[in-house]
Image (cartoon, rainbow, N blue to C red):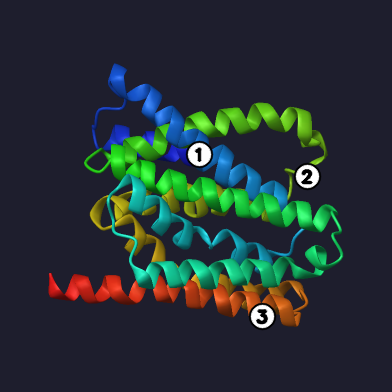
Amino acid sequence: MGAICLFILQLVLRKNIFPEKSEWLKIFWVSLLICIGYYGLSTFGMQYVGSGLSAILVYTMPIITSVLAHFILAEKLNRQKLLGLGFGTLGIIAILWPQLRHLQFNLVLLGELLIILAAFFWACATVYTKKEFASYDKLKLTMWQLLMGGLILLGLSFFTEALFSIQWNTSMTIIYVMYSSVLGTALAFFMWNWIVSQIDASIASISIMSVPLLGIFFGHIQLQEPLSLNILMGAILICLGILSCSIKSKNVMKMN
């Protein structure tokens, strides 16, 4: 649905729709990273993990991005970013501690590990987009990455989901699908691709640090998800990690 909306917008704006022959493979790789690696794994993992905790874990992405950007984009990994990486690692350990303490591998731990892996793939997609698509048409990029990734996810869903049990005849179902596909996916991915192309990947990632806290808050208020001490400690440590990564970078931006 999101790809279709962007396709129509491309036609209205009379922009070139099809990538060059040399661009197809690059778009395919970024589509796999963001749609399958991030979107698919995080959605699957959220079956076993609450929304607030999922938001905390998946938004370790800024810290991972800072490390990857150091090696791939030459965005220097300074002491502040290393400190942030340390805070983030401690935060993840705090969140996973109930399972790690008893060496208990269950569906909750599986979900948490899948979401952390999704954060890694999101970070990879962010760095790859910055490296390969800095000056590329962001509407075209987002449209094709959603179309390619969406078709792969659709194919996988026939083997993993009971598609025909979904009640499509309710207004709320249609509203949820429209919101998640058009606003939450197409618009959000387009804006993210544009932001990443304008500033350092690590700075762009840091700008979304409020999401984990909002995820905890709304998960507790709307879904009555419990707030345990280890989750709160983990959230604080991860946010400190993201903040630590941002402090020195912001000062450098001001000097420039």
Q: Which mark is residue 33?
A: 1
Query: Which numbered disc flags the more N-terminal residue, 1 or 3?
Result: 1
Q: Quadrant of residue 243?
A: bottom left
Q: Which residue is mark 3?
A: 232
Query: Which numbered disc flags the more N-terminal residue, 3 or 2?
Result: 2
- Name which residue type carries label 1: Leu
Residue lying at 42% horizontally and 67% vertically, measured from the top left: 82
Q: Residue 226: x, y in percent?
A: 78, 77
Q: Is residue 15 visible?
A: yes
Q: Residue 123: x, y in percent?
A: 46, 50
Q: Which residue is mark 2?
A: 167
Give the Cα separation between the discs numbered 1 and 3: 29 Å
In front of the other: 241 or 137 = 241
The reply to whether the C-beta atoms of the residues labelled 2 and 1 are less than 8 Å apart is no
Q: Is residue 105 above or below residue 78?
A: above
Q: Residue 245: x, y in percent?
A: 39, 70
Count of numbered labels shown in the rendering:
3
Q: Is residue 207 visible?
A: no
Query: Which numbered disc flags the more N-terminal residue, 2 or 1?
Result: 1
Q: Give the quarter of the figure containing the C terminus.
A: bottom left
- Name which residue type carries label 2: Gln
Give the class, few, some or many, for how many residues have Cα within 10 Å of label 3's Cα (few <14, many ≥20): some
